[in-house]
Image (cartoon, rainbow, N blue to C red):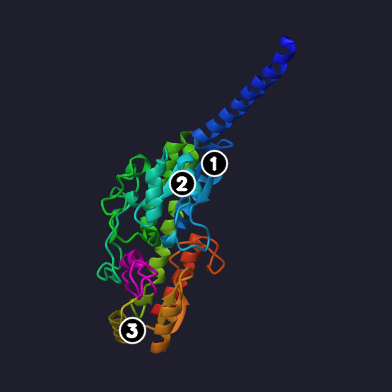
Amino acid sequence: MNIRRLRPTTALVGAAALGLTTLTACSSNVDDGRTDGKLDVVASFYPLQFLAQRIGGSAIHVSSLTKPGVEPHDLEISPRQTADLSEAGLVVYLKGLQPSVDRAIAQAEPRHVADAASYTTLEDHGTEVEGDHDHGGDHDHGGEGGHGGEGGHGDEGEEGHEGHAHSGDAAADPHIWLDPVRYAQVAKGVGKALEKADPDHATTYKKNTTALVKELTTLDQDFRSGLKDRSSDTFITTHAAFGYLAERYGLRQEAISGLDPESEPSPARIKGLHSVAKKDKVNTVFFETLVSDRTAKTLAGDLHLRTDVLDPIEGIGDKSKGDDYIQVMRSNLKALQKALGTK
């Protein structure tokens, strides 16, 4: 009797042990931030997802907190996404761009963090940004040996959340990816973060980072040459996303709203844009793909100007003029050339 009674108990214990073993195996898979041997990387939004995908290649799994077609400034993090952050092998984000992401990272405490703001310099931009016309945008803003690239303090973002001094400042412009030079600095930082999180594939990450930086350098050179001999420096756009681009290439950005794409312009701002458009012979008002074009089209209609898309590339969707960052940036270059009257 006792022996018969023990058999199911023994079987139950064995099953429990087997379940525990299976659970432990699954847990260890989660605990090391990998799935099927590949590093799990969570990016906060598209420009950082693009970097991770291009640098990590087939060695990593990449997911984005911001789904296609969602305006990243408006993102709210779900409990499931917060859990994903805690389980990830590396989280790549831009401190100060998405407050809900900043809070979720502080709560989840991921094992490795790459803060894009720590790999370059952030500046304070408002609705008006004027580039350096004397130097044609050639100033480097912390290139090799400065804040970005190998020589800077980029490693701070991988573990310690320190970031750049401006990165948590609400007035600091986060749209660094629209300057190919700054974006290349961030690419180098993300590459180093991947090497640190996954040393076994460091050679792959180095190789892919070098290739991507070379491609971004070519993009920068194409913007420089493509925007020469223009008839105007001024462009009007929906929100102040293009301050770094304007500085880099000696242009003047006039934004309808500020850094927040959802903010409404004041009557005084609209009146000022009327004056700017007439004085600087502006022929185009730019709008973007992820926010309403109503104000831009109203302003263009009042001034009898054309409209076109200048994409801040905060996400890739059905309306994007290209399948990835490089393609959309080249579309932006063509739109600027047309609007600024390049020869």
> Of label 1 and label 3, which has the lower sequence position?
1
For the question of whether residue 2 can be seen, the reply is yes
In this rendering, the answer to whether 206 lies above or below 216 is: above
The amino acid marked with disc number 3 is Ala
Q: Quadrant of residue 301?
A: bottom left
Along the line of sight, the residue nearer the viewer: 76 or 213: 76
Q: Secondary structure at mark 3?
A: helix
Point out residue 105 in the picture as x, y percentages from the top left corner: 40, 46
In this rendering, the answer to whether 190 lies above or below 293 is: above
Pointer 3: what residue? 277
Point out residue 338 in the picture as x, y percentages from the top left corner: 44, 78
Q: Are marks 1 and 3 in contact (CB under 8 Å)?
A: no
Task: Count neighbours of disc 3 (C-alpha within 10 A) and say few if under 14, some if 14 to 19, many if 20 or more.
Answer: many
Point out residue 277 in the picture as x, y percentages from the top left corner: 33, 84
- Gap between marks 2 and 1 measured at Cα: 23 Å
Tell me where the magenta segment starts and ends, as one range: 238-264
Q: Quadrant of residue 141?
A: bottom left
In this rendering, the answer to whether 111 lies above or below 163 is: above
Pointer 2: what residue? 82
The quadrant of the picture occupied by the C terminus is bottom left
Q: Quadrant of residue 267?
A: bottom left
Q: Is residue 29 left or right of residue 138?
A: right
The amino acid marked with disc number 2 is Thr
The amino acid marked with disc number 1 is Ala
Pointer 1: what residue? 59
- Gap between marks 1 and 3 measured at Cα: 50 Å
Q: Residue furthest front?
A: 1
Along the line of sight, the residue nearer the viewer: 45 or 313: 45
Point out residue 224 in the picture as x, y percentages from the top left corner: 38, 67
